Amino acid sequence: MVVKFLNKIKYNYKMNNYFMLYKFNKIIYYLNILLYNYNYLLRFYIISIYNKYYIFIIFNKYYKMKYFKIYVKYNQIFYMSYNKLLNFIKLNKYFKGLLILYSVKYKFITHILSLKYKIGGILIFYIF
């Protein structure tokens, strides 16, 4: 369900931003309720940086995460706080299409379908 939802966003975002956000608001709401019943938390953000749109999805159990494990283009892995992550994106003009997922159970996962294992994580990607 999450994968279909993200594919629709990627396709429809170029058409009409306001229509797209209104259309998917209901889906996000029902998805939140569904995950809440299973003790999972979903937060969904679209952030515009340098006229590029990034989707931030936070999907986790109910506890605070201070650091994210980041996979960058050339196999660099490091930990970063949320504020530092935003600063990194603002400073790096060549920041494109990277998948970021902090895993509770496994060391590192690079695919969105990993969410089906209900391990929780943070996923960030750029809308091309």
Image: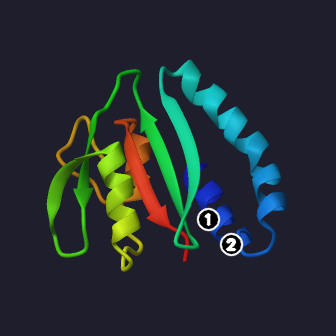
Whether pointer 2 and pointer 1 mark residues with C-beta atoms closer than 8 Å, the reply is yes
**SS at badge 2:** helix
**SS at badge 1:** helix
Position of 68 compared to 75: left or right? right
Report crowding for label 2: few under 14, some 14 to 19, many 20 or more residues within 10 A (C-alpha): few
Query: Label 1 is placed on what type of residue?
Result: Asn
Q: Quadrant of the C terminus?
A: bottom right
Residue 11's disc is: 2
Vertical arrangement, residue 128 with respect to residue 70, above or below: below
Residue 80 coordinates in the image, percent (x, y)? 23, 48
Residue, x 76% and y 54% (percent of image)?
A: 21
Position of 36 compared to 26: left or right? left
Residue 83 coordinates in the image, percent (x, y)? 35, 46
* Residue 38 can be seen in this image: yes
Residue 77 coordinates in the image, percent (x, y)? 16, 59
Position of 69 compared to 30: left or right? left
For mark 1, what is the residue?
7
Foreground: 16 or 42?
Answer: 16
Q: Quadrant of residue 125?
A: bottom left
